[in-house]
Image: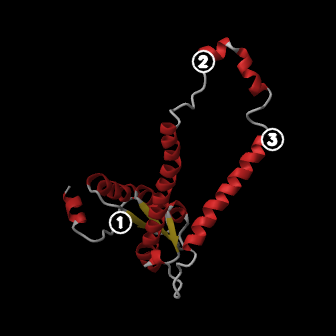
Amino acid sequence: MKFLELGTTCKAVVCCRVTLLQKAQVVELVMQNENKITLAIGGDGANDVSMIQKAHIGVGISGQEGRQAVLASDYRFGQFRFLERLLLVHVRWSYLRISKFLRYFFYKNFAFTLCHFWFGFFSGFSAQDISAVHSLSKPHLHTPGQNNEFFNKKIFAESVIHGILTSCIIFFVLYLSVSNTTRPGGMTQADL
């Protein structure tokens, strides 16, 4: 544990002249005892593979020795200097994009699903089918299914057309409502 205490007081830890298992154990030690994101950077040899795979983020630097570490990594670079751009630019962009996607994902699902929920109150929850007992005792109720009355080519075509029209309405209402929000410099209000 003294090693962990010493290591966590440092901004970065470089482990050299250790076995491949020890490299992975250092990463695992930090992951299990600290609430920190781990970044492991390996060269081009096979001795860094377990460390790269164990860390939250694994980076492989291409070189002359081999491609095992590069193939096992999450990100690959030809030179170490590209790491700065990954961490300071692309990680931020990725976080913003994922956050925006997740916000939209939950918004969309709540908006769509709750419409059905609210409709239940206004329809008296009457969208109930007959019970299993009635279905067994009245076989003539199966006739519409045998005649494809609930799903056939005409109903399928109507559903496709309805979906296309709905998507056009949603898209163009939103597109036209925000089409003039781009500023002269090319930035939108959301970018500010």
Nearest-to-viewer mark from 2 and 1: 2
Secondary structure beneath disc 2? helix
Amino acid on which the number 1 mark rests in the picture: Arg
Residue 98 in the image, given as x and y percentages of width and height:
47, 62
Quickly name the residue at label 1. Answer: 17
Residue 136 in the image, given as x and y percentages of width and height:
65, 14
Q: Residue 9 occupies which quadrant of the picture?
A: bottom left
Q: Which mark is residue 132?
A: 2
Circles 2 and 1: CB atoms closer than 8 Å: no
Q: Residue 133 occupies which quadrant of the picture?
A: top right
The residue depicted at 53 percent of the width and 36 percent of the height is 123
User: Disc 1 versus disc 3: distance between alpha carbons?
Assistant: 70 Å
Quick one: label 3 or label 2, which is nearer the N terminus?
A: 2
Secondary structure beneath disc 1? loop
Quick one: label 1 or label 3, which is nearer the N terminus?
A: 1
Secondary structure beneath disc 3? helix
Residue 85 in the image, given as x and y percentages of width and height:
45, 78
Amino acid on which the number 2 mark rests in the picture: Ala
Amino acid on which the number 3 mark rests in the picture: Lys
The residue depicted at 44 percent of the width and 63 percent of the height is 99
- Residue density around tag 2, few if under 14, some if 14–19, many if 20 or more, within 10 Å: few
- 37 up-or-down from 190: above or below: above
